[in-house]
Image (spheres, rainbow, N blue to C red):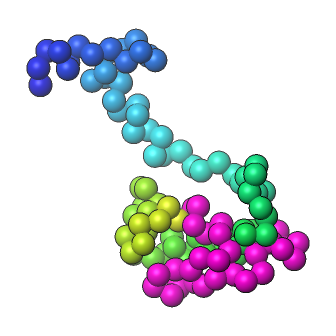
Amino acid sequence: MDDFVKNLIDPRSGRRLIEALPDAFAIQDLPPPPMDEAPHGVEPSILASKKERNARMDICNACPSLRRITKLCAECNCVMPAKTWLAMVECPQGKWGKSLKGRANGDT
């Protein structure tokens, strides 16, 4: 590594970038923010119920195709905490299917 790279400064922390890099990877250890309601601007009727989302994610967490650190599925390359929110999607391995009802019937 040349001296130019070794001496780059992180503008946020003021530390040398080579010392600040480990902090950039610490975010993977944080739990996802709790989301019990539809994000702003998203039509609730396209979303799966909370019960179904949790059941889908439990199945994904037990699946060997889930990449644990990134929560990406090795089969479809989807971000599973996001995919499990959508009512009209399904697991490419058939482990869970589409939800035709979603939250349209008031199921939360």
Residue at coordinates 44% horizontally, 38% vertically from top-left?
26
Q: Quadrant of the N terminus?
A: top left
Q: Is residue 60 left or right of residue 38?
A: left
Q: Is residue 99 left or right of residue 62?
A: right
Residue at coordinates 69% horizontally, 81% vertically from top-left?
99
Q: Is residue 30 left or right of residue 86?
A: left
Label count reads: 0
Q: In the image shown, does 54 or 49 lie closer to the viewer?
A: 49
Quadrant in the picture for residue 56: bottom right
Magenta region, main secondary structure: loop
Residue 28's place in the image compared with 66, above or below, is above
Residue 96's place in the image compared with 3, above or below, is below
Residue 66 visible somewhere in the drawing: no
Counting from the top left corner in percent of width and height, residue 31 is at 57, 49
Residue 30's place in the image compared with 105, above or below, is above
Q: In the image shown, does 107 or 62 lie closer to the viewer?
A: 107
Residue 35 visible somewhere in the drawing: yes
Counting from the top left corner in percent of width and height, residue 32 is at 59, 50
Q: Is residue 23 left or right of residue 101?
A: left
Residue 101 lies within the magenta run: yes
**Which stretch appears magenta?**
81-108
Counting from the top left corner in percent of width and height, residue 69 is at 42, 55
